[in-house]
Image (cartoon, rainbow, N blue to C red):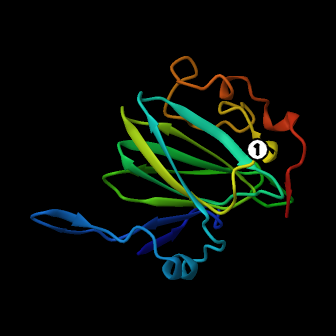
Amino acid sequence: MKVERLAIPDIILLTPPRYADARGFFSETFNARRVAAAGIEGDFIQDNQSLSLLPGTVRGLHCQVAPHVQGKLVRCVRGAIWDVAVDIRHGSPSYGRHVAAELSAENWCQLWIPGGFLHGFCTLTADTEVIYKVTGDYDRASERAVRWDDPDLALPWPVSQGKAVLSEKDAVLPRLAECDVWFRV
């Protein structure tokens, strides 16, 4: 498995090998021992899957706070996404900064996003499916979110404001500056 730490070293890009032959391919997409050796801590307790029908669909920016903090290991199994993590750990040298990676069925990359980060993605193709493992249970009371287009974050989304496909909930979120402190280093 190829392991690459991004500009914020807590975010890790993983690329499992694929073994192809005339039938197709085989890939071990998750191995707890190898993931731990890559520096990813936490027990994965649930898998989630989403389907986004239209390109330009934005999901995020979301996180969960204590006691139900979630780390996420995200991969795209059909289509492609621009996946982003924003550091919201007060006191972190990278507070308010982001890292992003394109995840696709073609490049087979996975992105590790630990607790303390907002997470979101934008679909680059139609009929995009994303699967992600999480380290904590979903808890509505612990869920927090920030506007995807927060001008203070200035994320370089691959879709313009008027073209993004959003849920009703994501369309009315606050800016990060309007939120309480959710995480501290």
Q: Nearer the viewer, residue 39 or 50?
A: 50
Q: Amino acid at mark 1?
A: Glu
Instruction: Find residue 152 and report its image quarter.
Output: top right
User: For the point 66% across and 72% down, which residue is it?
Assistant: 42
User: For the point 58% across and 59% down, which residue is it?
Assistant: 46
Q: Is residue 59 above or below residue 14?
A: above
Q: Quadrant of the N terminus?
A: bottom left
Q: Is residue 48 above or below residue 152?
A: below
Instruction: Find residue 162 and report its image quarter.
Output: top right
User: For the point 32% across and 68% down, which residue is it?
Assistant: 27
Residue 105 screen position, x and y as percent: 34, 51
In the picture, measured across the screen, residue 1 lies left or right of residue 156, that is left
Q: Is residue 173 above or below residue 2?
A: above
Q: Is residue 10 above or below residue 132?
A: below
Residue 119 screen position, x and y as percent: 64, 47
Q: Nearer the viewer, residue 122 or 67?
A: 67
Numbered-mark total? 1
Identify the residue under disc 1.
143
Which secondary structure lies at badge 1?
strand
